Amino acid sequence: MEQMKRRKSLGDALSGMGTLLQALERRPSASELPALSRISTDLFVNGQAKPLSPMQQCLANVALVAASQQHQHQPQHQPQPQHQHQQPQPQHQPQHQHQHQQQPQQHQQPQQQQQLKQLKQLDCAVEAAPRRVPGSPDSMPDLNLNNIHTSQQQYASNSPVLIQQQQNWTQQSYSCNEFNNQQVLSEAERIVPRKRCPLANPLRTAPDESAITAACSPAQSTECKPASAQPSTNVNCFAPNISSPRTDTTSFHSDSVGFSNPPFPRQPQQTNMAASSSCAQQLSAPRHSSGGSTMLPNLQQNLGQISYTGNGNQSGYYNNGPNMSNTWEQQQQGPSVVPFATHSGYLQPQQQQQPTRQKTATFSMLGRSDQKTSLYQRGPAGWTSKHPCAWSPMDCQLWFQSVAEDNGFIPGSLDFGMFEGVNGAMLTRMGCIDFIMKDKAHGEMWFHALGRILDQCTSATDIGQLIPKNEPTENLNMYGNSSLQFLSPANLTGPVGTDMSEYLQDHFSNDEFDDIDINGEAVNFPCQPPLQDYTCLNGAAVQGQSPYYTPASFVAQAQVSSSFCSTSQNSDGMDYKSDMESESTRSCSTYSTPSSSRLVYSFGSYSPTERSSSSADSTPPRQVRTRAPKPEKQQNKGRSKHGTRGNHLWEFIRDLLVSKDTKLNPKIVKWENQEQGVFRFVESEAVAKMWGEKKCNPRMTYEKLSRAMRYYYKSNILMPVIGRRLVYRFGAKATGWRV
DNA sequence: ACATCCTTTCCTGATT
DNA sequence: GAATCAGGAAAGGATG
């Protein structure tokens, strides 16, 4: 009932506003002014119809001021500058407002004077007003500005989607003055949040008018201006499918080798260097130190069926068809779509790659070494003779069948339909969770089985030829390529034999995230790779930190890690080693307990607090800015940040959001309003840790993540939701999140 | 070599 | 006081 009343009152308000503005546009006669003024008053003060949205306030504010001005001027027969009533004049708006709001006070009733005073405060109150989520039941209905404000006619040519996007609370974070001053304002400009106006909240403070004007007028202060105004030509760039040329493919090629029922074979696309190496990169980048551009002729040959767009599409996805957004949308629509792209970009660096020997040990620990025998050599002809990356969808289906049989399933009893259309390249790009998302019951089994094959591939001569000579073959395993690598079997530190799905359920609950230590000391994701994976840790440094990590695997991993640290995977190993050592030294001296003669990256014990305390002896007034060492530096070699398009933060967040895994959504992220792309971090630090896992940066925090998120404001990928913590909104350039 | 992109890191100050 | 937000500044790595 209350809501109905509210809606009615809002409707009345909007109706009144429309009337008001229409009258103003036709330059109302003096006789109309009192009525218009009444409408204005009703809108603002008497109309207790919930606070108007900032945009409405702005419009009505302008209207009222203009009406008051007319009312004031006309009886005095003062010349009326034409522009004063036709459109708000950006350049003079603050001054005009100030002047014209002063003058009526002499003649208006005290109540109206008070109203005007309130209006002035409202100018800067826009940030105080929106405290609701767009689309929520309490949200104000969006205004169609095109109908009520001629100065916004530029938007008429824009798509309804964008118009709607312009009508949100976020954009309304601009003050009335700003709004009026920027008749042609790109969305990028509009969404970039200005610095908070210290006087913006009239409910908190009641600053004097001059202070308000000074603080909030862009003409007088730059403090509240958008951080990075972009050319207004961006207005014309509004389009539903705006995509960054660097991050997205912009079109859906229906004839492409699609994720769903790909029409293999297909004419291989002409690939440039990057493209031709893309598969190799995606296959091997996390496993090699290829620098992202190493040509792998054999592999390229073997992967002839797999085409990539070498031009423009550097999103890191197999361009077997749609861009990522389409992929996701398709995934939402049908079962035949392969969620390869879900985490495709999350190439894992080499530090998570376990040498085959260690993998074997891990499998042995898991009691599955017996299953590792010659699986690659068995099975139907076809897939056995190729590297998994070169498997066709049919090969994959045969392989699925083989694995099922190997695991004791009656032939035909398992349905692999969810993997229909998946080729080997896609499979090798899928992480454990990807498999589970596709096949909750057996995803882990598929993942492990493929991992075993890839392990065997590392020693296969034909596969070995695919690998650059300077790359250790051990690195060719899928685990390091897992999108969510902490779920990899090599790092599966959970109960042996535990069903991964259950395991996820058990550990991806809100409660279980309690074990996530912000300082990174105890980040216990279910299958989180050991901290040693990231660091050249002295084994004892963190031993036992993860309850999921068994001593046996710990030792093995520690050995791997130390070995990794001491031997670079690059041809320039020596240089790299020295580089590592230097960084390690810094790390040790700065952040770690230098108790060990071995070089230690102790990110686990790193925290800003500790760092500060460790340098307490000579604490400068302001901490000398020394960038923390990057323990993953050597491990990132070969990983292409930009070559792996799709590895962007916003895509990662989006993938979490569109994930149907309830352990991710809504446990750690959730939609607030999916239609409008509004989402919220439920477990902000957990998200940050997961992001850190993806980027092999164990020091990632939500603070850092959020900084990166805020950078997306400029690029219109994300938009802030003012007044709501941990809430963001996808912008026009963010694709793939719509259902 | 250089510019650019996309973060990452650190920071200050404000807000909740 | 902690968490979060906003954004400047600097830097790094990859790419074109």
Image (cartoon, coloured by chain):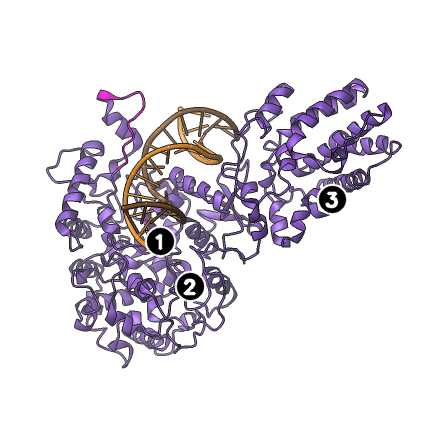
Chain colours: A purple, B brown, C orange
Residue closest to the eye, A416 or A45: A45
Of all residues shown, which one is farthest toward the right? Answer: A31
Of all residues shown, which one is farthest toward the left? Answer: A597
> Could you tell me which quadrant the N terminus of chain A lies in?
top right
Q: Distance between the residues labelled 2 and 1?
A: 21 Å
Q: Which x, y percent locates residue A421?
A: 41, 73
Would you say the residues marked 3 and 2 are in contact, meaning their CB atoms lie under 8 Å apart?
no
Would you say the residues marked 3 and 1 are in contact, meaning their CB atoms lie under 8 Å apart?
no
Q: What residue type is labelled 3?
A: Ile
Q: Is mark 3 on a helix, strand or loop?
A: helix
Q: Which x, y percent locates residue A573?
A: 14, 51
Which chain letter matches label 1? A
Which picture quadrant has residue A617?
Answer: top left
Q: Nearer the viewer, mark 3 or mark 2?
A: 3
Mark 2 or mark 1, which has the lower sequence index? 2
Q: Which residue does the image show at 31% across and 62% down from the upper left?
A: A282
Of all residues shown, which one is farthest toward the bottom? Answer: A381
Does the magenta segment cover residue A73? no
